[in-house]
Amino acid sequence: MKTKQMLTLMLVLCAAWSSGQTIYSTETGGQWQNSSTWIGGVVPASGNNVVIDGTVIVLNYDNKCNNILINEGDFLG
């Protein structure tokens, strides 16, 4: 079972880095739509890959990204 989970994780990670610019959240996080939540000040769009490195809060349903990776111990809510 662990081998299957590891393979799935590897496939997801490969897909996440295969297309689109990757945008990282700050370690302090914040609201998805605020530019201060993201390193470089760019709010992710539908073509971007996203890595969550802090707590990111989603307040509306119009937030989009291509792929998302939530690091262990971090939160998307």
Image (cartoon, grey):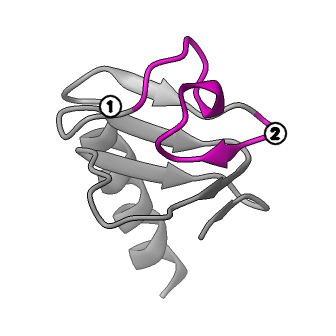
| Foreground residue among 17 and 50 | 50
Q: Which residue is mark 1?
A: 17
Q: Position of residue 76 (x, y in %)?
A: 59, 64
Q: Residue 50, labelled with which disc?
A: none
CA gap between label 2 and label 1 equals: 23 Å
Q: Position of residue 52 (x, y in %)?
A: 59, 46
Q: Is residue 30 magenta?
A: yes
- Horizontal placement of 5 versus 65: left or right? right
Q: Position of residue 22 (x, y in %)?
A: 39, 25
Range drawn in magenta: 27-43
Q: Which residue is mark 2?
A: 28
**Main SS category, magenta section:** loop
The structure residue drawn at horizontal position 39% and vertical position 77%, both measured from the top left corner, is: 4
Which element carries disc 2, helix, strand or loop?
loop
Q: Is residue 11 magenta?
A: no
- In the image, is residue 65 above or below residue 41? below
Q: Earlier in the sequence, mark 2 or mark 1?
A: 1
- In the image, is residue 57 above or below residue 26? below
Mark 1: which amino acid? Answer: Trp
